[in-house]
Amino acid sequence: HRLSNQYANPKEDGEMTETIARPYRVASGEGIDNVWWKSGRVTVKAGAAETGSFSQIETDDPRGSGPPRHLHHNEDETFFVLEGEVTVRVGDERIDLEAGDFLFGPRGIAHAYVVRSERARMLVTASPGGVEEVFFNLGIPVTGSEPPTDAVMPPLDELVRLFAGYGCEILG
């Protein structure tokens, strides 16, 4: 579902300059890609291919879910809670977030989160972008309002290998 969102800017002499991202709109509830990931839903609103610089993902996760502790070698990450309550561990620090709260997670510091409320929706930004490609490649396309009961994620060692290709180290 990737957008053809970039174009080259011609100079007066016909030579092409840098690629420039075009503005685009993604409607509420929609995304460039919309996949089930583990027990939650991941909607990629913008990827590095569309923006040229960052990715933005909307997560919708049930209570008790969240990613394993991991570390981004390439990206800074931000978390903006749209609905619900989430606890994030960044390094040795525990940070409780609720709707309207924002957290900056710098690259190079291990982190993970867990949803404390019935559900939580967040807008997660990675800069630079690129890591969203893992969701494109491994997520199960959304075709209904509930995750498929037969959805199977790759084994942990395969996830570790795939995320490592994007500079993300899964620590457990």
Image: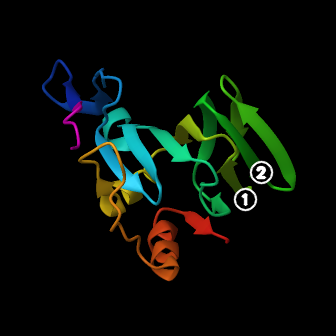
How crowded pointer 1 is (Cα within 10 Å; few <14, some 14-19, many 20+) is rated as many
**Where does the image place residue 53, in percent across and percent down from the top left?**
44, 37
SS for callout 2: strand
Marks 1 & 2, CB-CB < 8 Å contact: yes
Which residue is nearer to you in this view: 82 or 124? 82
Residue furthest to the left in view is 14
* 4 is within the stretch colored magenta: yes
What amino acid is at disc 1?
Ala
Identify the residue position indicated by label 2 in the image: 90
Which residue is nearer to you in this view: 161 or 154? 154
Which residue is nearer to you in this view: 132 or 141? 141
**Where does the image place residue 21, in percent across and percent down from the top left?**
31, 28
The answer to whether residue 92 is visible is yes
SS for callout 1: loop
Decide if residue 3 is on the left or right side of residue 86: left
Q: Bounds of the magenta span?
A: 1-6
The answer to whether residue 47 is visible is no
Decide if residue 18 is on the left or right side of residue 162: left
What numbered label is drawn on residue 110? 1
* Residue plotted at (41% across, 70% down): 153
Residue 30, relative to residue 155: is it above or below?
Answer: above
Which residue is nearer to you in this view: 98 or 164? 98
Q: Quadrant of residue 108?
A: bottom right
Decide if residue 142 is on the left or right side of residue 47: left
Please tell me which of labels 1 and 2 falls first in the chain: 2
Residue 97, relative to residue 71: is it above or below?
Answer: above
* Residue plotted at (58% across, 54% down): 74
* 56 is within the stretch colored magenta: no
What numbered label is drawn on residue 84? none
Residue furthest to the right in view is 92
